[in-house]
Image: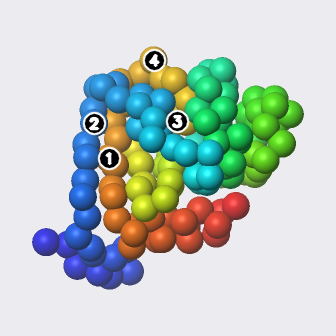
Amino acid sequence: MFRTDNGGFACKANIKVSAGGASLWGTKLSQIKESDKILICTYSLPHIEYAEKIFMKNNGNAEIVCHEKFKGKADALMAKFPNLKIRLRNDVHAKFVVINDTVWCGSENFGKSTWIESCVGIKSKEVAEYFTTAFYLIF
């Protein structure tokens, strides 16, 4: 059993684990609605066409933090989705997505990956609030 300490807090949650590329972002976010806001922390923006399909479901109602190396892709996404906000940083490598009371955290960048990836989905209001706070500390 984990304990709350300086490294994080302990909580109970509903958890889903995927590994080996079994689940793509489109599958994980298939239930988003037009009113849902998505917070995305990713190193890169691979295959922005894939991300565009996801953002079409909620009119780009999202905020993204990604590495500054991907400014061109970030600009292209913002041009297509005026509601989308992107912050570029030179030190980001974390990968997580917060939507409502669910957090997806793992090795895969936001987009379509050709790598073998792993990801954990955590359905918990407490965990979502924790990651939302972490997101806005770097945004």
First in residue order: circle 3 vs circle 2: 2
- Up-down: is 2 above or below 121? below
The three-letter code of the residue at mark 4 reads: Thr
Of the pair 6 and 101, the residue shown nearer to us: 101
- Distance from the alpha carbon under mark 1 to that under mark 4: 18 Å
- Distance from the alpha carbon under mark 4 to that under mark 3: 11 Å
- Distance from the alpha carbon under mark 3 to that under mark 2: 14 Å
Number of the label disc, if any, that sits on residue 114: 4
Give the SS element for disc 4: loop
First in residue order: circle 1 vs circle 4: 4
Name the residue that disc number 1 marks: 120
- Distance from the alpha carbon under mark 3 to that under mark 1: 13 Å
- Location of the N terminus by quadrant is bottom left
- Distance from the alpha carbon under mark 2 to that under mark 1: 6 Å
- Location of the C terminus by quadrant is bottom right
First in residue order: circle 4 vs circle 2: 2
Name the residue that disc number 2 marks: 18
User: Is label 1 in contact with label 4 (beta carbons under 8 Å)?
Assistant: no
Of the pair 114 and 6, the residue shown nearer to us: 114
Name the residue that disc number 3 marks: 109
First in residue order: circle 3 vs circle 1: 3
Is 83 left or right of 47, judged from the image as shown? right
Is 78 left or right of 136, judged from the image as shown? right
Q: Residue at x 41, y 48 (%)?
A: 104
The three-letter code of the residue at mark 1 reads: Val
Q: Residue at x 56, y 71 (%)?
A: 133
